[in-house]
Amino acid sequence: MTDERPVRRSSKVKVAEFLAAVGEGNLFTKLQLFEGVPGVAQADRRMRDLRELGWKIDNYKTDPHLQPDEYRLTRIGTRIDLGEQPKETPRPRISAARRREAIERAGSACQTCGMAAGEPYPDEDLRAVLSVHIIDATPPVDTELSNLRVECQRCNAGIRGGGTALTTPEEVAERASGLSSREEKRRLYRLMQAGRPERDEVDLIFAEWLRLGRDERVEVMLQLAGALIEDE
């Protein structure tokens, strides 16, 4: 008797199939992505995984003409949805010396939330463990310090304290401009200039600001400078 059970397709293959149908050069939204691959809980993460297979997907951080919920499929890579096998490429390796250099440059603290290595989280019985990961893994992979980021295990998993979703540049700028006192705005601006996080509400906004792209950080900092001028 012939086994006619359907072949199970991975989540990554389903996402690749959806993107191939979108077509190179075309736009799609995050909602369309999730609707296009029903049953795949982390479709956006599987989409990011495709970048290692040569797929180029732009968002508002790489293309300022896009909205925060928009993506553009710039290039189709390995067609795993058609059974094409990815080429064997060596996994990018960050040397131990480079990892130490990145952690030292970050002051032995998470560059997103500011937690120091070994420091206990205030809301759970867990201590921060730092790791160094590559920001842009598109081949050929660059392991220079500018393409490395130090994060604790919670931020590296894509969450902030309490599991809060990551914020947008607009939300960070709005919170920064909405600080109750001029001194808080001045302190936040000094933190942005120094590039080092601390704690309290100002520090939490600063940590979110650090997670933005370079041009977005400059834009938010200039908006805060404008708010300081208005407070004169």
Image (spheres, rainbow, N blue to C red):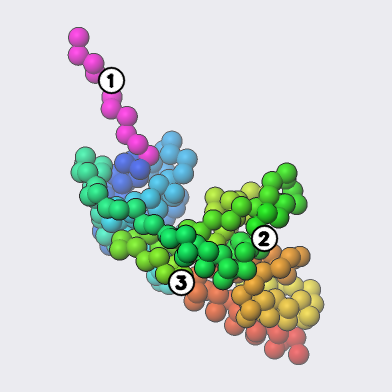
SS category of the residue bearing label 2 = loop
Closer to the eye: label 2 or 1: 2
Q: Is residue 46 above or below residue 75?
A: above
Residue at image x 49%, y 76%?
215
- Residue furthest to the top in view is 1
SS category of the residue bearing label 1 = loop
Residue 4 position in % (x across, y down): 24, 18
3 or 1: tag closer to the N-terminus: 1
Q: Amino acid at mark 3?
A: Ser
Residue 60 position in % (x across, y down): 44, 66
Closer to the eye: label 3 or 1: 3
State which quadrant residue 111 falls in: bottom right
Q: Are marks 2 and 3 in contact (CB under 8 Å)?
A: no
Give the residue at mark 3. 146
Which one is nearer the viewer's eye here, 43 or 202? 202
Q: Is residue 214 visible?
A: yes
Give the residue at mark 2. 116
Give the residue at mark 1. 5
Q: How packed is label 3: few (under 14 Cα within 10 Å), some, or many (20 or more)?
A: few
Magenta stretch secondary structure, dominant: loop
State which quadrant residue 105 falls in: bottom right
User: For the C terminus, which image quadrant?
Assistant: bottom right
2 or 3: tag closer to the N-terminus: 2
SS category of the residue bearing label 3 = helix
2 or 1: tag closer to the N-terminus: 1
Residue at image x 68%, y 49%?
127
The magenta segment: 1-11
